[in-house]
Image (cartoon, rainbow, N blue to C red):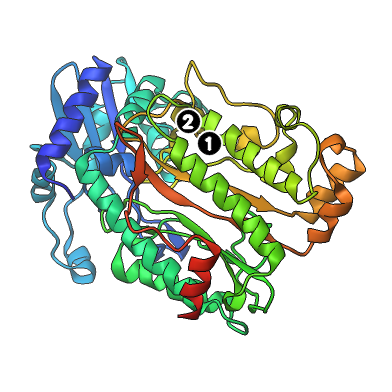
Amino acid sequence: MFKKEVYIKRRAELKKSLGSGIVLLLGNGEAPVNYFDNTYSFRQDSSFIYYVGLNSPDLAYMLDIDNDKEYLFGNELTIDDIIWMGNLPSLKERAEKAGIVTVLPLSDMITLTDKKRKIHYLKPYRYRNQIILSELLGKNIPSIKENFSVELTKAVIKMRLIKSDEELIELKKAGEIGYAMHITAMKMCQPGVKEQEIAGMIEGLAISQGNRVSFATILSMNGQTLHNHDHSGILETGRLMLCDAGAESNSCYASDFTRTTAVGGTYSEKQKNIHNIVLQALNESISSAKPGVTYKSIHRNAYKIIFEGLRSLGIMKGDTEDALNVGAPALFMPHGLGHAMGLDVHDMEDLGETYVGYDDEIQRDTMFGYRSLRFGKRLEPGHVLTVEPGIYFVPQLMEKWEKEKINADFINFNEARKYLNFGGIRLEDDILITKEGCRLVYEKRLPVTVEEIEKAVKD
């Protein structure tokens, strides 16, 4: 948790941007795994953390803009709570850390929620909070989900997208843990090792050094499956292991790196060729990222590099611009180049990807591949983003495109079929947009060239 002045300043800015009405920010509660007392590890709502900073369950914050009052709602511990959880600070003591004076029981929230006035709340993603808002506002759950405050959503996004110095320190801590996770995965990438063993080891590092993993670890020889959470394989010589993993700092800020490692640390010529195309796309995308440039244009340029690289191998063919205009490279990179990152690994995705990554100027594409770009708007100093190009050979997608003659003028399917058992390669770094350009969030870059990764595995 930061100093209370940070949260006081944030709430004052939020109040100024909205002008009137009541703001409700609901914290999260405990979520049972399979019965009430066996819960998942608690994770606070990120916007609640951003404005209040308190990382304990069953809290709510209200800002009455018109009357210049704010409240923290929660319940004091009972003796049973103390027996099982310890004598935690009182609600008032916790509120003081956030710079909030008035504390009230949760039951008082309904009395102070004046339904005749504008109630600003964010779109709830947890059923518990949907139910609470339904009872507070006297509306059914579908109505609650549809009628969230767009004004509040845009105000929160505008503030959270620009990272402060305090946040950058936490993001760097998360990056340091993520670095250790990936170095460990590389060193363990040996024939006969279980994927599950490596995934468990690096997730243990995330927990031992920070708050948790920032998302479910992706680690598999079947890298052609973009979000592959199956760790049942045993590493084999000649295969590639794609590891996409990150950590949260103790203050819940995220990291997100990807490296693809040859099992045993020796790449084949075919693997080197694909790796180097992806690496070129990564490096040129990072070099291009600076204020005023749209991330949408950087995504398109990554497609250009991938198309021309695969064309040099005989896998793709034809004119570059014509191929880009019809989205032909998306066969081999069906996802976007990156996303915003901060308190969430996909920053504020709960608030709506379109609000976070697009605006009145930059609209989301509808074409396959391009439409998967989560963040396309103009870059500004303070933005933190992932850069994660990749090349994948998805047998089912290749079969569909060949059968339906999709973009057949730009794809040499006979050559592409030689890579059906290849898997996929993705390389990902986290960057901060600065006034001059950009830099890595965690300055020590993971091994990324073929030579660097081979050395990391074999040392």
Residue appearing at x 34%, y 63% in the figure: 177
Amino acid under label 1? Answer: Arg
Q: Which residue is mark 2?
A: 357
Q: Measuring from the top left, give residue 199's x and y in whole percent.
A: 50, 71
In the image, taking residue 365 as reference, residue 85 lies left or right, namely left
Residue appearing at x 61%, y 37% in the figure: 372
Tell me if residue 74 comes above or below residue 297 in the rendering.
below
Tell me if residue 59 comes above or below residue 177 in the rendering.
above
Residue 382 versus residue 229: which sits nearer the camera?
382
| Mark 2 surroundings within 10 Å by alpha-carbon count, few (fewer than 14), some (14 through 19), many (20 or more) | many
In the image, taking residue 101 as reference, residue 239 lies left or right, namely right
Residue 179 location, quadrant:
bottom left
Tell me if residue 201 comes above or below residue 428 in the rendering.
below
Q: Secondary structure at mark 1?
A: loop
The quadrant in which the C terminus is found is bottom left
Residue 140 versus residue 201: which sits nearer the camera?
201
Question: Is residue 243 something one can see in this rendering?
Answer: no
Q: Measuring from the top left, give residue 133's x and y in whole percent.
A: 39, 33
Sequence-earlier tag: 1 or 2: 2
Say which mark, if any, is on residue 374: 1
Residue 63 location, quadrant:
top left
Q: Disc 1 vs disc 2: Cβ atoms closer than 8 Å? A: yes
Report, in whole angstroms, how far the alpha carbon at label 1 lies from the one at label 2: 6 Å
Residue 280 versus residue 37: which sits nearer the camera?
280
Residue appearing at x 21%, y 22% in the figure: 15
In the image, taking residue 77 as reference, residue 186 lies left or right, namely right
In the displayed image of the protein, which residue is found farthest to the bottom? 192
Residue appearing at x 75%, y 44% in the figure: 311
